Amino acid sequence: MAWVRVLISACFALSSLVLARENDAKLYLVSVKADTAQQRSQIADVGVALDGIFSDSVTFIGTDADINRVHQLGFALERTELPERMVDDFPSSDNAFHNYAETNAVLDQLVSQHPDIVSKHVIGQSVEGRDINGIRISSSAAVDALPTAIFIGCHHAREHLSVEVPLMLAQYLVAQYDSNPRVKEMVDTREIWVVPMLNPDGAEYDISSGSYKWWRKNRRQNSGSSYGVDLNRNYGKGFGGPGSSSSPNSDTYHGPSAFSEPETAAVRDFVRARNKTTVLLSFHTFSELVLWPWGHTEDLISDAKDRSVFETMGRKMASWNRYTPQKSSDLYVASGDTTDWAYDELKIFAFTFELSPSSLFGGGFYPGASAIQPTFTENLEPTLYLIENAADPYGVLNADVTDPLGIL
Ligand code: 0X9
Ligand code: ZN
């Protein structure tokens, strides 16, 4: 079938791939015939992490055991073995990506560049004991006193572009502060927090032992040779529900209990303490989507006004980055993600962006260094919009009266 051939050649064109994971189970690129959200949710529910969503199919990276579980549901599927290519740290062509040390160096550099508006904070430690660093950008000395926007990258290890975009946002704000009145106004009247690499253990593991490993989870040792909890299934709202797995080997393993992982517990405690937070954005890759709650259920948010804020903001941001705006569960139902928890517990308008590329054909999780700048550029206006509207997210409803079709 033509679509399978295209998929296979796209797979081999991917920049850097690996054959085996911890327990030496071979990894495959798997394509499954499925064309409805309900079918996608059914597939996600067996514990695979769907990464490519097409009109008539979905793809995931998985083992033979994953393939069998999907096959047992009666879906037609094709599998392609992933070719191996060794790398050392980021491959030289991907040098522009920041590993853990380089990310921290950028944060330190920002502090020394503009210590009056930037400060570095450790929000917690990873499973392997790395500091999880964040920076606060604000000219106000009073902490937690101004409307607050939070940006988080890299819940998922292999999604390296999700580190770069928030890092560049921080660099942009600091570099522009002295000369750009719009940025100065934001930094003077808001607290902006950026945590670019929430999952440093996973991100380092994905790149630093000789090959890209397609690693998604953190590096918790579950038992024996099984490692990792899916941090985007470990939050408290709907924990353990559909679209998350109780099997430690699964890529969507939710962990033994909500917030069992130090990385998600760090986010929970950090966000709770930033009690003026109204907006939050969790960066992921890939598929070019703007997503909002709920994700753990197909139900709509019951508060109609909040729902309108999510829809209005989501569509507005999508008009700039040209991504597809939708409720998370319209993609597939998945329980325990960041945004469901942040909205449920703290009523924060929390979004997930699935950054570029749009599909595996553009390089999937490893799109190459040339993706960094354009992906940042197209997401700059959406992120500035979130910061500006942090003072009164409900204000977007009034703004929309003059622009009912969201054209402006
Ligand atoms: O599955 C995820 O955690 C996110 N996609 S990714 O490919 N980056 O892993 C999407 C989360 C969206 N939330 C829900 N569908 N609940
Ligand atoms: Zn992700």
Image (cartoon, helix red, strand yellow):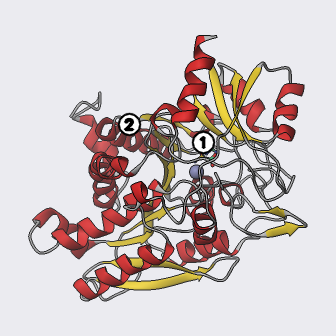
Quarter of the N terminus within the rendering: top right
Q: Position of residue 126 (x, y in %)?
A: 65, 77
Is residue 352 shown to the viewer in this render? yes
Disc number at residue 315?
Answer: 2
Find numbered disc 2 in the image and state the secondary structure of the residue it sits on. helix
Q: Position of residue 256 (x, y in %)?
A: 84, 64
Q: Position of residue 71 (x, y in %)?
A: 85, 26
Disc number at residue 112?
Answer: none
CA separation in Å, label 1 and label 2: 19 Å
Tell me what residue is drawn at x 40 percent, y 72 percent: 193
Is residue 114 shown to the viewer in this render? no
Q: Is residue 19 left or right of residue 398?
A: right
Tell me what residue is drawn at x 60 percent, y 47 percent: 17
Would you call the spot at circle 2 few (<14 residues within 10 Å), some (14-19), or many (20 or more)? Answer: many
Question: Which residue, given by chain and number where applicable, does mark 1 sit on?
Answer: 302
**Residue nearer the viewer, 129 or 114:** 129
Q: Is residue 15 above or below residue 141?
A: above
Indicate if the residue with disc 1 has its beta carbon within 8 Å of ligand 1.
Answer: no
Q: How many badges with numbers are in the image?
A: 2
Q: Is residue 398 above or below residue 117?
A: above
Would you call the spot at circle 1 few (<14 residues within 10 Å), some (14-19), or many (20 or more)? Answer: few
Tell me what residue is drawn at x 29 percent, y 32 percent: 406
Q: Position of residue 185 (x, y in %)?
A: 18, 69
Q: Is residue 259 left or right of residue 147?
A: right
Residue type marked 2: Arg
Quarter of the C terminus within the rendering: top left
